[in-house]
Image (cartoon, grey):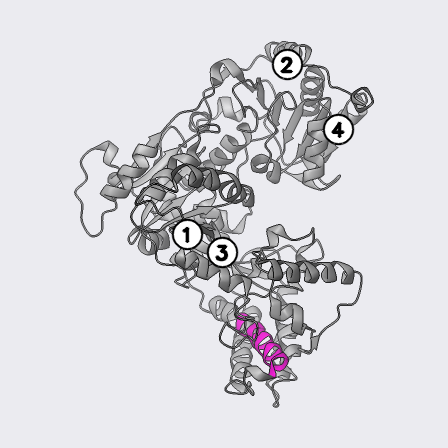
Amino acid sequence: MAEAVAAAMVDGTHLLVQAGTGTGKSLAYLVPSLLHDRRVVVATATLALQHQLVERDLPRLVDAVGDLPGVDASYAVLKGRSNYACLHRIRAGVPDDQGTLVDVPVGPMASKVIELRAWAEEESEAGGSGERDNAPRHTDREWRQVSVNHRECLGAAKCPFGQECFAELAREKAQRSHLVVTNHSLLAIDAIEGVPMIPDYDVVVVDEAHELVSRITQAATDELFAADVDRAAKRSQRHVEGHEADDLADAGDALRAAINDLHPGRIDVVPDALSEALVAVRASARACLSAYPKGDSGGAAQGDGDAGLNQAKGAVQEVFATAERMTAHSEGDVLWVTEGGDNRPPHLCVAPLQVWGPMRDKLLTDKLAVFTSATLKLGGDFNAVASSFGLKAAENVDSGPVERGDDVLPWRGLDVGSPFDYAQQAILYVARHLPPPGRDGLGQAQLDEIVELVDACEGRALGLFSSRRAAETAAEAVRERLPHLTTLAQGDAQLPELARQFVDDPHTALFGTLSLWQGLDVPGDTCQLVLIDRIPFPRPDDPLMSARQRAADKAGGNGFMQVAATHAALLLAQGTGRLIRTTTDRGVVAVLDPRLATARYGAFLKASLAPMWATSDPAVVRKALARLAAAAPSPIKQSDAR
């Protein structure tokens, strides 16, 4: 893989590398990245990988090669502005709903905000990074009291604390560094939205590349709450002398009424009431912005006043930009109303119909890209994932000569394999005898199957379910019929605590939904059974996925295979990958959806999975699980250890 990455950097051919867990792929791209003669950006999807690169892999690599002549081993981490504590907000105060700067936090979260402020001051004194990941434990709401987004920021030139600013210091360090580690979202904002966030670079390495499309989609998705309009209007009242802030508040009321009259789901034809409300929000936000005082309102010397005005104006700009996008009714966007819930009222969302076009035009045309992940081959080849990035099957140099030109982006795919012997280490069990899953959730046959499998392995089971309701139903059935085992369901505690309990007690089953499909790493005897209740197709009423599927059909393609089946294959590969994490792991992946064996698309899905030994015989699987459970070492009780 290292040789392939180095070659790609020389000849300018984009590269997709599938590299399974345990192959050492981070070193395989970091080594040629340090040897490359221009700056390289590494973009990750998760904080865990970013932490691994910065805290473990890069320091070890720098120790090994940093003294070699001609090797620039400097590196930096770069994140979005809201990921850093803001010293101005901490020292000058936070604006309330009226836009007045309040110095002392009040209410139940006050002590945590005070703790975060003290931590940020310590970071500043010690020359720390001020990054959110290093802060004391906190919630999103608490963090917003000590941070700002890019619209709220005063800017280094105006801010009295600009010389100390954590975000500015991080950008300056990135400017001086050969290798910059960032995230998918910041990469999208810089390369695709055209907002300069990252110093000029030659090559981008995208790790966890199976997440890239969804992360870019998230970064390009805008939301509009009626409450956002209300808040922007209230903050503007002390800065705008005319009626403009009141007009904005009235537009927010009209938007709330229009949203409340709609059913959740995609909006193909915008109703008149909603269209009029959005136009009113856009127009009143524009007028409100024009009514703000011109210039610096007294300059940076006023400090607090500048911050309050800047942050209030930033809120109005956010509302205006989103309303303007929604009123454009672009064919390249999808608009929908959310269902609401979890203390969030129904609101509007707008997202790009596809991202492969901007990726091709604004990233891959200008930069050399290396994409890597444990999951890039779907249906047995790289074409599905490559096309989602904007690369065409006809441009694959592995398929034959590709004539290079201005509008041709040559690429190749490489599967470096895995250190695991899946045929010997894992069984893929498809419960072909079960009825197909229905809309009403898990039936009695599926629950019986789950209980029997969990019983056979004496716990040690990770259940990956298509919905929270299914996970809770399965957990309740197992608790009732196997009371001697510990059964945990997502929501019983925070995910790190659930994972800790799962690891500490091998006679434990853990059932959950999407965050467990991709975010859990539990090697060893803790997990000998991965249960999947149904093929994870997107919901038929998912606004964005259904729109993309319809667009693929209209373009003459197969929307189901290009969108729904590809989505399911990716998640299945990620979910089944929870089982084998080391060369000594053994176990069973049990898929309770018979369509994996009986439907025509089943072959595509199975070709996306690791080459496990396959069976549909439940007796064979139960015996295998029982043997594994009997061979597993007995846990050492804490009392024995003491």
The type of residue carrying mark 2 is Leu
The type of residue carrying mark 1 is Gln
In contact (CB < 8 Å): disc 1 and disc 4: no
Residue ID for mark 4: 487
Residue ID for mark 3: 219
Disc 2 crowd, CA 10 A, few/some/many (<14, 14-19, 20+): many
Mark 1 / mark 4, whichever is N-terminal: 1
**Residue at x-position 56% and y-position 88%:** 298
**Residue at x-position 32% and y-position 37%:** 5
In contact (CB < 8 Å): disc 4 and disc 2: no
Residue ID for mark 1: 354
Residue ID for mark 2: 625
| Residue 304 lies in the magenta-colored region | yes
Residue 535: which quarter of the image?
top right
Disc 1 crowd, CA 10 A, few/some/many (<14, 14-19, 20+): many
Which segment is the magenta one? 302-318
Residue 629: which quarter of the image?
top right
Query: Residue 571 at what x, y percent from top left?
Result: 52, 35
**How far is mark 3 from mark 1, CA to CA?**
13 Å
Mark 1 / mark 2, whichever is N-terminal: 1
**Residue at x-position 64% and y-position 28%:** 462
Closer mark to the observer between disc 3 and disc 1: 3
Mark 3 / mark 4, whichever is N-terminal: 3
**How far is mark 4 from mark 2, CA to CA?**
18 Å
**How far is mark 3 from mark 2, CA to CA?**
43 Å
